[in-house]
Image (spheres, grey):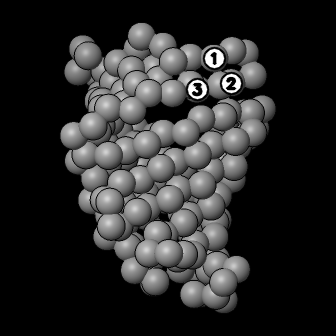
Amino acid sequence: MTSKGTDVLVVVNNTQTQPDGETEDIKIMVDGVYYKKNNKYYIIYKETDTTNLMSCSTTVKADIDKNSVLINKSGDICTNMLYNPGQMSTGVYDMKFGQLCIEIITHHVVINLSDDGGEINIRYKMDLGGHNTENDLSIKINKRNN
């Protein structure tokens, strides 16, 4: 892994379960950059919605020592989401059309990363502007063969 990072394929899967039990699966596959600094792994990638009207840059910071994950989004969507097992974090989800309060209660975090890639799994409850969902988030990192 170089100081500039390694080119990777990032696969993000999130299963959201509504209070009525209905589920929605969200999956994205994008190119990204992956590197390690101060015993923390960083994943950086760009997201666009299916209509290409909104895009944001996403940085995932996985702290192995604290077993926590911080996801920062900037662009058409701006937010910081902190996942610490057994803890609640709050913030703002800022979009083009307004802001929503966000509250996250993290059930568990599993970080299984190495210099070659790996996976992060997070289970959490999210309240986004009064809408509650249970979430299972998986972020997989696969090195690109160049």
How far apart are the two marked residues, 3 and 2, measured between alpha carbons?
6 Å
Side of 23 relative to 2 (left or right)? left
Q: Secondary structure at mark 2?
A: strand
Instruction: Find out whether the residues at labels 3 and 1 contact each other: C-beta distance under 8 Å.
Output: yes
Residue 146 in the image: x percent, y percent?
A: 66, 89
The label on residue 93 is: 3
- What residue is shown with label 1? 99
Q: Amino acid at mark 1?
A: Gln
Which residue is rendered at x = 74% and y = 33% of the image?
A: 76
- Determine contact: label 2, label 1, CB under 8 Å: yes
Quadrant for the N terminus in the image: bottom right
Residues packed near mark 3 inside 10 Å, few (<14), some (14 to 19) or many (20 plus): some
Q: Amino acid at mark 3?
A: Tyr
Q: Secondary structure at mark 1?
A: strand
How far across and down, in percent of the image, does residue 18 sit?
A: 31, 21
Rendering coords of residue 115 (x, y %): 46, 83
Q: Position of residue 52 (x, y in %)?
A: 76, 38
Residue 56 sits above or below residue 40 on the image: above
Q: Secondary structure at mark 3?
A: strand
Query: To which residue does mark 2 refer?
Result: 95
Q: Residue at x 50, y 75 (%)?
A: 38
